[in-house]
Every structure is written in C-alpha cells, then in structure tokens.
Image (cartoon, rainbow, N blue to C red):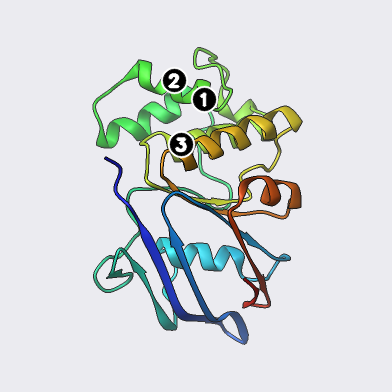
C-alpha cells in the first residue's frame, strides 16, 4: 500500500542579499491531490519548491514531511521525483541509456521496465538518437520519465510542460491525473492557466514571495 505523505510549511522566509524571495509562507499538502503554485517570474515559486526539496535552507520557519523537520531530522526530500530547472543529461547517450545509468545506481537492471517508462511519456525506447540532438519537447518528456522512473510518492514539477506541443501536453496531463489517482502528492508550478485549471485540486498564488491567494 502506498505511503501517505503530508508536507507542512510553517511560516517560512528566505532572503538573498536584499531580495526577500519568500515571506512568511504557510501551506499544507497531502497525498492524492495536485496542488498548483502560480505567480509571475520572480514570485518565489521555484525558491519554494527548492526549499521543500531541501536544496535551499529557509532563514525562518520550518518544513515538515510526515512530521519530520527538513534540515534537522531530514536533509533532503526522499521518495520524490523532481523537475526543477533544466535537468542534466548525458548528451551523447540515448534516452534509454540515460535512464538506465541513473536507475541502475540504486536498482537492479530492468530493461523492460525502463522501456515501459519511456513509452509512458511518449518516447521510443529503441531510438538510438543521442539526447543532445533531441528537440526541447523530447528532452522535457525524458525529464518527466526521469522523475517518475522510480515510482515516487511525491512529484515536484516546475513548468513540466515546457517545450511540449498540444499532443504532448494532453498526454502528460493524462499521465499526471492517473498518478494522482494512484495516491501521489503532486506540486505543480506553471504559467499555463489551462494546465492549472485542468490538473489542480487546489491553487496557491505567490507574488513577491508572499502568498496572496488560497
């Protein structure tokens, strides 16, 4: 049975030099839902997601994952698939070779399973074309494959539809909704109102680091 997750954000703030990226933000997220995080560039969306993952330490407040405090009891968010900014791929390798390299670091080699993951995101697992020659949309599909390949309970997705055409967007929406039905907790940051309206159960807006709508 899939583990239930709760992420509690309690009054967190983060400052970079003279810029307040986050100001006293409090939120709560639970498994089985998709939460939308919206706001203009520089609103604090990506900083918030990085704090939740443990990539950035908050100046004030705390983040609890199933009651354990980030930065004290746990250093990084585990059991999570993450897309934040452009992922690093081995450009001369194929999509399958990239996934295989990362997957077999922690798991037994399983070619058929990785083929299935690539098919889920609409990529041909037998394609030998090096990733360096992929279009932006194909790279984004591979990024999603990398995020979901270990069947994590939590997904942190910052603009996951970047570079996808209409068909690709429709396919990824269907994939994320299915993953929600499986009980995953999904945080979804996007500029696209249609994606947010279709996918998200609850939506939160950040403006200049502050929560302005709940």
Q: Which residue appears at 26% of the width and 37% of the height? A: 106
Residue 41: where, in percent of width, then height? 71, 65
Q: Which residue is mark 1?
A: 120
Residue 42: where, in percent of width, then height? 68, 69
Q: Is 134 above or below relative to 57?
A: above
As rendered, which of 85 and 158 lies closer to the eye?
A: 158
As rendered, which of 174 and 132 lies closer to the eye?
A: 174
Instruction: Give the CA distance from mark 3 to mark 2.
Output: 12 Å
Q: Which residue is mark 2?
A: 116
Q: Which residue appears at 55% of the width and 16% of the height? A: 124
Q: Which residue appears at 49% of the width and 24% of the height? A: 118
SS at badge 3: helix
Task: Single out the mark in the foreground, 3 or 2.
Answer: 2
Tag of residue 146: 3
Q: Residue 2's image quarter?
A: top left
Q: Which residue appears at 27% of the width and 74% of the height? A: 72
SS at badge 1: helix
Q: Is 190 above or below relative to 105?
A: below
> In the image, is 128 to the left or to the right of 194?
left
Residue 89: where, in percent of width, then height? 50, 37
As rendered, which of 187 and 48 lies closer to the eye?
A: 187
> In the image, is 30 to the left or to the right of 134?
left
In contact (CB < 8 Å): disc 1 and disc 2: yes
Residue 161: where, in percent of width, then height? 66, 42
Disc nearer the start of the sequence (3/2): 2
């Amino acid at each position: 049975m899939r583990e239930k997750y709760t992420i509690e954000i309690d009054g967190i703030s983060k400052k970079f030099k003279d810029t307040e990226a986050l100001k006293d933000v409090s939120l709560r997220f639970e498994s089985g839902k998709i939460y939308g995080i919206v706001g203009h560039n520089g609103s604090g969306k990506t900083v918030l997601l990085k704090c939740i993952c443990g990539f950035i330490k908050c100046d004030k407040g705390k983040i609890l994952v199933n009651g354990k405090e980030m930065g004290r009891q746990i250093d990084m968010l585990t059991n999570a698939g993450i897309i934040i900014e452009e992922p690093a791929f081995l450009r001369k390798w194929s999509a399958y070779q990239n996934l295989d390299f990362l997957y077999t670091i922690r798991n037994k080699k399983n070619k058929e399973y990785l083929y299935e993951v690539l098919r889920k995101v609409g990529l041909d697992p037998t394609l030998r074309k090096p990733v360096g020659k992929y279009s932006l949309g194909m790279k984004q599909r591979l990024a999603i494959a990398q995020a979901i390949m270990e069947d994590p309970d939590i997904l942190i997705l910052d603009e996951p539809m970047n570079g996808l055409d209409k068909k690709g967007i429709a396919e990824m929406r269907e994939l994320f909704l299915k993953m929600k039905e499986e009980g995953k907790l999904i945080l979804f940051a996007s500029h696209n109102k249609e994606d947010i309206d279709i996918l998200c159960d609850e939506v939160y807006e950040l403006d200049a680091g502050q929560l302005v709508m709940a």
